[in-house]
Image (tube, helix red, strand yellow):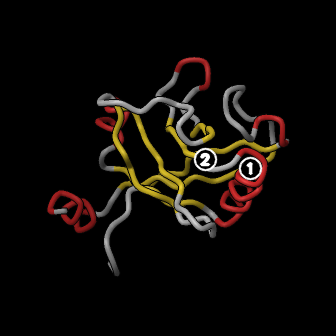
Amino acid sequence: MSGPVRRVDITGEAAAVVRDLTGVHGPVMFHQSGGCCDGSAPMCYPDGEFLIGDADVHLGDLDVGLDRHVPVYISRPQFEYWRHTHLTIDVVPGRGAGFSLEAPEGVRFVIRSRLFTDAEFEALQRA
């Protein structure tokens, strides 16, 4: 394990889509949906448009190759289910969720996940 353990990352392909979306919409953010009409998709919004509160957990900030990082949040109840899981935001062809910025672009963001190793989870607990 090199460097601090991160809870969330992004693939190069998804980062390229985020850069394109930022060029059109300005700074963006992600919120990992916990279900309902959009399933459990990572939702991309103009930064500040989705109101974050005490019921949300900041997973981290993504470096997508811009002058600022992209914040990622998840609802606290969803975080409790996924606290042992590393998440990676990826992109695939298809129709995105109706509320997410990539919806009209012919792609959709998805989450890839894996369990943290014991060492990674212990490092997160200490941090």
Q: Residue at x 57, y 52 (%)?
A: 89
Callout 1 crowding tier (Cα within 10 Å): few <14, some 14–19, many ≥20: some
As drawn, is 72 to the left or to the right of 107?
left
Looking at the picture, which amino acid does disc 1 mark?
Leu
- Asked if residue 66 is positioned above or below residue 88 in the image, the reply reads below
Whole-percent x, y for residue 32 in the image: 50, 38
Across and down, in percent, residue 60 comes to 40, 55
Residue 115 vs residue 47, the one in the foreground: 47
Q: Looking at numbered disc 2 in the image, what kind of residue is underneath it? A: Val
Residue at 79%, 44% (x, y): give it: 107
Disc 1 is placed on an element classified as helix
Rendered image quadrant of residue 30? top right
Q: Residues within 10 Å of mark 2 (few under 14, many from 20)?
A: many
Q: Are marks 1 and 2 in contact (CB under 8 Å)?
A: yes
Q: How many marks?
A: 2
The tag earlier along the polypeptide, 1 or 2, is: 1
Residue ID for mark 1: 21
In space, the residues marked 1 and 2 are separated at their CA atoms by 8 Å
Position of residue 121 in the picture relative to residue 16 (left or right):
left
Residue 17 x/y as whole percent:
74, 55
Return the residue found at the far top: 36
Residue nearer the viewer, 43 or 49: 49
Q: Which residue carries the number 2 mark?
A: 28
Residue 103 is left or right of residue 36, and the answer is right
